[in-house]
């Protein structure tokens, strides 16, 4: 081939390579094919193809080309290394970068600021800030890019004091220098400093760009400072800063996190192309405000969703106690072939915990194991908590014991779980094991410990642990701990001691304290104390039914019907209605809810037939309904019928109909189980020879063979 032929071919290849560097230009594979057909490419051509591969996200190919260049004896120059260092920073191979740096020192005795800037950038991308700074200080000539690159390197690893020192030493600064500092502060949990730096930047008269604004809006979102965020939005309009998708997303996110969803929606609607992060930011904002209707409306309009979208919706539903809706999102994300992360799984396990959806919880556990999702301490704790709240404290203990790592939250969760299942002694034994392992209990741990003492009647143990909080661990008891101790003493019949403790509290007793004292007074028929507690409770919660109902029951039990009628009249006069008992049971994957006296369930007639059968067998077994706390307007037969339609009895009847005879029934109730239902369920468990677990608002009751795990102490 003639010399002119080679020249023409080289020019053609050069043109092909340069076209690759133009947005929307040529294909890198075609450029490489033509390059490799050249017999003796020049250093200039090698540099261009190395640069093109790096620009087209093929940095490994750039380094491979350099090795071929060396094999063919072609001498590199400073531009070769400039492009190589940029490529190497994308590959993120420290060893390769150091090798190239050594090769540069060996082969070339000259350098330029652009090549050295690339070298500094490479080391900062590796996180090798000491090497980056060494190159920086050895540079004969530095420009603003040199300073900014090393400042950005310090910001990247969170060493903001070093970054600030260099920033203050800079002979000149540009918008990128300022932005590096603002972004560094925002990304390292110092949003206040980021905003302060932005204000200095504006005062210095630096022309703003979209990158700087995005960084400071991130800080505003973290701090939820709406006024500053709005001021920055005004600056964007004033300076006619182009509204890129990143800037629009940052504005939507800032407004949403500040609770200003109307403004967030306005920015969102103004976007020409609504990118996924904008949808997610707005949905998350609505979810955090509890506006799940608006969030779901947006969710259903999306053409594309990712796991962040689903996580926002799941957590949002959980925060507003819509647990069924949260669980129903799991099959949707699976249908989209999205891979749940730990946030997803922990959220769904929380939903299962609250619904008592054991089967779905088991499926999630299996999914975790099959998908090799890393089971860290947070996920392990969520699993243990799910099994505990779904009535399987045995499985909860199994998960807990298999956890390779446990923290105070894990121990607190299992102790609390054992407490509400009535296994107080085992809870205290685990607490002792936790202490022996050197873990320091916190306030939450002690709530679980004191609850364990309360539910199991361990008065002396409760007093010991209540005292050791302060004396051993310097934990000042809070109102929740006093509430537990009032419960411990009250349940045990030590009403004077419980009242004395309330009088000695360093803070004003709240409604929970007085309700606990009132409940204990009801159990032990202390009318005077019940009236005193009710008086305080009615001042604190005049529109809630709890105090009225408890006091009504105290009077009814003692036959003081005039007083009972007076209490009921007070409720009616103030428009207060007793909270309806609601119980749920999961059959298959569906949650069935029952409300006392409600006839809306599609299988109500069949359930009624089962309740009648239960009633007949209960009477044959010697069951006598406890009608003393039923409305006075009914005769005895009507009172008995009213008791039969209590929500937990309806749920149990449905469970007997629909769940296999060898499987336990788990019923969740919003109120405490009444005395009549408690007596009846013990007999139902014995007659049908099956375990029935009822989770009321205070604890778990495991009914087996005519007995309850609470030993009638609830």
Image (tube, helix red, strand yellow):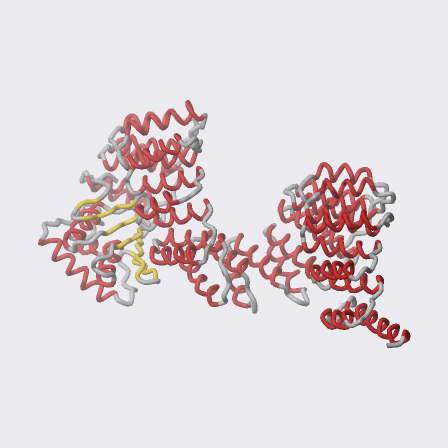
Tell which of 409 and 132 is nearer to you: 132
452 shown above or below 360: above
263 shown above or below 564: below
Query: How far from the left and from the top, in percent, is residue 382?
Result: 42, 48
The quarter in which the C terminus is drawn is top left
Left or right of 380? Residue 95 is: right
Left or right of 122? Residue 14 is: right
Q: Is residue 257 visible?
A: yes
State the image quarter where residue 367 is shown: bottom left
Q: Which residue is pictured at 84% across the width and 54% down the height?
A: 78
Q: Is residue 572 visible?
A: no
Query: How far from the left and from the top, in percent, is residue 611?
Result: 19, 59
Looking at this view, name the residue that lies furthest to the top: 471
Left or right of 271? Residue 583 is: left
Left or right of 42? Residue 452 is: left
State the image quarter where residue 588 is shown: bottom left
Query: How far from the left and from the top, in percent, is residue 672?
Result: 29, 46
State the image quarter where residue 135 is shown: top right
Tell which of 373 and 610 is nearer to you: 373
Q: How many marks?
A: 0
Query: How far from the left and from the top, in percent, is residue 477?
Result: 42, 29
Q: Which residue is pictured at 55% across the width and 68% down the height?
A: 301
Tell which of 144 and 389 is nearer to you: 144
663 shown above or below 679: below
């Amino acid at each position: 081939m003639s010399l002119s032929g080679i020249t023409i071919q080289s020019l053609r290849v050069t043109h092909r390579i340069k076209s690759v560097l133009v947005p929307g230009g040529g294909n890198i594979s075609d450029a490489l094919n033509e390059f490799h057909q050249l017999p003796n490419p020049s250093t200039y051509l090698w540099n261009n193809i190395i640069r093109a591969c790096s620009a087209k996200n093929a940095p490994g190919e750039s380094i491979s080309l350099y090795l071929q260049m060396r094999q063919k004896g072609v001498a590199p120059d400073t531009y070769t290394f400039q492009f190589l260092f940029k490529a190497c920073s994308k590959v993120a191979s420290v060893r390769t970068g150091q090798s190239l740096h050594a090769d540069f020192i060996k082969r070339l005795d000259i350098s330029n600021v652009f090549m050295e800037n690339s070298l500094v950038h490479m080391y900062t991308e590796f996180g090798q800030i000491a090497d980056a700074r060494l190159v920086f200080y050895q540079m004969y000539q530095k420009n603003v890019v040199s300073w900014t690159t090393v400042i950005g390197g310090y910001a990247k690893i969170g060493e903001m004091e070093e970054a600030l020192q260099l920033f203050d030493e800079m002979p000149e600064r540009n918008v990128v220098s300022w932005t590096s500092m603002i972004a560094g502060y925002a990304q390292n949990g110092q949003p206040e400093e980021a905003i302060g730096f932005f204000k200095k930047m504006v005062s210095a008269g630096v022309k703003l760009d979209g990158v700087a604004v995005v960084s400071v809006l991130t800080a505003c979102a973290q701090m939820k400072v709406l006024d500053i965020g709005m001021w920055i939005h005004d600056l964007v309009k004033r300076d006619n800063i182009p509204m890129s998708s990143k800037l629009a997303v940052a504005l939507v996110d800032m407004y949403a996190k500040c609770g200003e969803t109307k403004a967030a929606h306005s920015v969102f609607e103004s976007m020409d192309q609504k990118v996924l992060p904008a949808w997610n930011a707005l949905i998350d904002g609505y979810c955090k405000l509890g506006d799940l209707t608006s969030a779901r409306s947006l969710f259903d309009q999306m053409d594309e969703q990712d796991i962040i979208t689903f996580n926002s919706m799941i957590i949002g539903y959980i925060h507003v106690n819509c647990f069924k809706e949260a669980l129903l999102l799991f099959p949707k994300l699976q249908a989209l072939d999205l891979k749940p992360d730990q946030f997803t799984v922990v959220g769904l396990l929380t939903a299962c915990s609250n619904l008592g959806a054991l089967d779905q919880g088991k499926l999630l556990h299996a999914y975790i194991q099959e998908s090799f999702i890393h089971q860290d301490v947070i996920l392990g704790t969520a699993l243990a908590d799910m099994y505990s709240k779904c009535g399987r404290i045995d499985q909860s203990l199994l998960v807990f014991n298999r956890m390779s790592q446990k923290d105070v939250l894990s121990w607190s969760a299992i102790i609390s779980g054992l407490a509400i299942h009535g296994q107080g002694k085992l809870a205290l034994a685990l607490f002792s094991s936790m202490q022996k392992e050197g873990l320091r209990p916190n306030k939450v741990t002690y709530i679980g410990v004191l609850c364990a003492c309360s539910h199991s009647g361990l008065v002396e143990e409760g007093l010991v642990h209540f005292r050791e909080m302060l004396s051993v661990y310097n934990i000042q008891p809070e109102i929740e701990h006093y509430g537990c101790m009032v419960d411990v003493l009250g349940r045990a019949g030590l009403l004077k001691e419980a009242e004395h403790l309330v009088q000695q509290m360093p803070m004003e007793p709240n409604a929970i304290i007085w309700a606990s004292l009132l409940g204990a007074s009801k159990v032990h028929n202390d009318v005077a104390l019940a009236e005193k507690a009710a008086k305080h409770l009615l001042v604190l919660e005049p529109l809630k039914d709890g105090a009225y109902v408890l006091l009504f029951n105290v009077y009814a039990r003692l036959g003081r019907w005039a007083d009972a009628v007076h209490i009921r009249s007070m409720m009616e006069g103030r428009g207060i209605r007793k909270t309806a008992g609601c119980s749920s049971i999961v059959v298959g994957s569906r949650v069935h809810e029952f409300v006392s006296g409600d006839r809306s369930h599609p299988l109500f007639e069949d359930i009624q037939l089962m309740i009648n059968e239960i009633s007949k067998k209960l009477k044959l077994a010697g069951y006598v309904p406890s009608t003393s706390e039923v409305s006075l307007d009914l005769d005895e037969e009507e009172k008995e019928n009213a008791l039969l339609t209590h929500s937990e009895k309806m749920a149990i009847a449905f469970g007997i109909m629909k769940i296999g005879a060898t499987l336990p029934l788990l019923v969740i109730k919003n109120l405490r189980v009444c005395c009549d239902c408690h007596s009846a369920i013990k007999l139902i468990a014995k007659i049908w020879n099956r375990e029935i677990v009822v989770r009321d608002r205070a604890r778990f009751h495991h009914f087996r063979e005519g007995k309850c795990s609470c030993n009638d102490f609830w």
